[in-house]
Image (cartoon, rainbow, N blue to C red):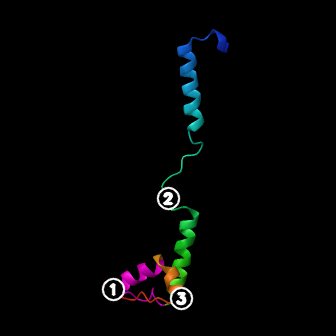
Amino acid sequence: MVPLRSLSLRDKLRLWRLRRRISRAPLVYRRGGPGLLGVIYFFVGAFVAGGHNYLDAASDIGDIVSGVLGIILWPLILLGIKLHL
């Protein structure tokens, strides 16, 4: 390793910039998945929507949309708001 005193000002600046860039780099890169909370939210939503008959046999597009809305907006179902289309 070269002593810092023997480096030129330009080399010191390059070294400082490199250290600064490395210190900002994330240690773990996260992929764009839903994450654990998203998976838990989905399963709770499916359980609540199924318990309130939003996931019954889908005979038309309205039943499918109601099921999807029931899974996504399950806190509203617990508040008593009807999402059946």
Most foreground residue, 65 or 16: 16
Q: Badge 1, how many Cα within 10 Å: few under 14, some, many 20+?
A: few
The x, y position of residue 28, in whole percent, is 58, 45
Q: Is residue 59 magenta?
A: yes
Q: Are marks 2 and 1 in contact (CB under 8 Å)?
A: no
The x, y position of residue 67, in whole percent, is 42, 82
C-alpha gap between disc 2 and disc 1: 28 Å
Q: Badge 3, how many Cα within 10 Å: few under 14, some, many 20+?
A: few
Q: Classify the position of the C terminus by image quarter.
A: bottom left
Q: Are marks 2 and 3 in contact (CB under 8 Å)?
A: no
Determine which residue is flagged by label 2: 33
C-alpha gap between disc 2 and disc 3: 27 Å
Determine which residue is flagged by label 3: 51
Q: Is residue 70 left or right of residue 85?
A: right
**As drawn, 37 above or below 25:** below
Q: Which residues are magenta?
A: 53-71
SS at mark 3 in the image: helix
Determine which residue is flagged by label 1: 62
**As drawn, 21 above or below 15:** below
The x, y position of residue 22, in whole percent, is 57, 33
Q: Is residue 23 left or right of residue 32?
A: right
Q: Are marks 1 and 3 in contact (CB under 8 Å)?
A: no
Q: Specify the label residue 13 is tagged with.
A: none
Residue drawn 54% across the image and 32% down it: 21
Residue drawn 47% across the image and 88% down it: 81
Q: Is residue 82 visible?
A: yes
Badge 3 amino acid: Gly
